[in-house]
Image (cartoon, rainbow, N blue to C red):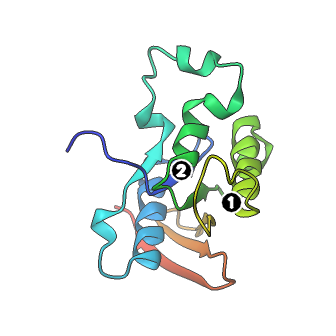
Amino acid sequence: AGKQPPMWMVSHWWGALFPHTVRMLQLQAASRYLHGAGAVTYWCCAFANNQHNLSELDEIELLKTPFSRAMLSQGCMGTVLLCDPQFTPLIRTWCVFEVQLTQQLRCGKFPDRVERRRYFLDILAPVLHDDSMSIQTALALEDGSHDSETSRFA
């Protein structure tokens, strides 16, 4: 499909199992876009950055890094924070930076860079069950509502 502008920036800590990541993003898309979840686009550094050449991360000005550029792009509506049961992203420097920039965008700190009225923060976390073969994914939406689903893995 080629390059597509991101609708959401994914903040993650590199330790989540890939099936959990996929299920969390599927729940977020289905919760926000009841009938068009398949068209949602995400910016995720694991896929958007060339992991063999990370020279873009040497940028001194943080607002010029790939993470910030994705969040500041006109089509980006918010950040999806993918957590584990221990909420590990909240002790990772880049994730904390992304959450801090999210809050600044939510408060309208960059009106000269971004023209938008709302910027969202969706937080998702898996709740692992004893059998480790199922996962309940919980999503907290900015408006105080929430959603969840249970998936079984073979």
Q: Is residue 14 visible in the rendered structure shown here?
A: no
Q: Which mark is residue 85?
A: 1
Q: Which kind of residue does numbered mark 2 sit on?
A: Val
- Which quadrant does the C terminus fall into? bottom left
Where residue 21 appears, x then y in whole percent? Answer: 48, 54
Residue drawn at x 42%, y 35% is: 48
Instruction: Please indicate whether residue 113 sits to the left or right of residue 20 in the image.
Output: right
Q: Which kind of residue does numbered mark 1 sit on?
A: Pro
Q: Residue furthest left?
A: 1
Q: Which circle, 1 or 2, is nearer the viewer?
A: 2
| Distance CA(mark 1)–CA(mark 2) | 17 Å
Q: Are the two marked residues, 1 and 2, in contact with CB atoms closer than 8 angstroms? A: no
Mark 1 / mark 2, whichever is N-terminal: 2
- Which quadrant does the N terminus fall into? top left
- 78, 89: nearer the viewer: 78
Residue drawn at x 30%, y 81% is: 35
Residue 144 placement: quadrant: bottom right
Residue drawn at x 41%, y 36% is: 47
Q: Residue furthest bottom?
A: 145
Where residue 114 appears, x then y in whole percent? Answer: 60, 52
The residue tagged 2 is 10
Residue drawn at x 53%, y 67% is: 131
Pointer 1 local density, CA inside 10 Å: few below 14, some 14–19, many at least 20:
few
Query: Element under label 2?
Result: strand
| Residue 85 vertical position relative to residue 5 in the rendered view, above or below | below
Pointer 2 local density, CA inside 10 Å: few below 14, some 14–19, many at least 20:
many
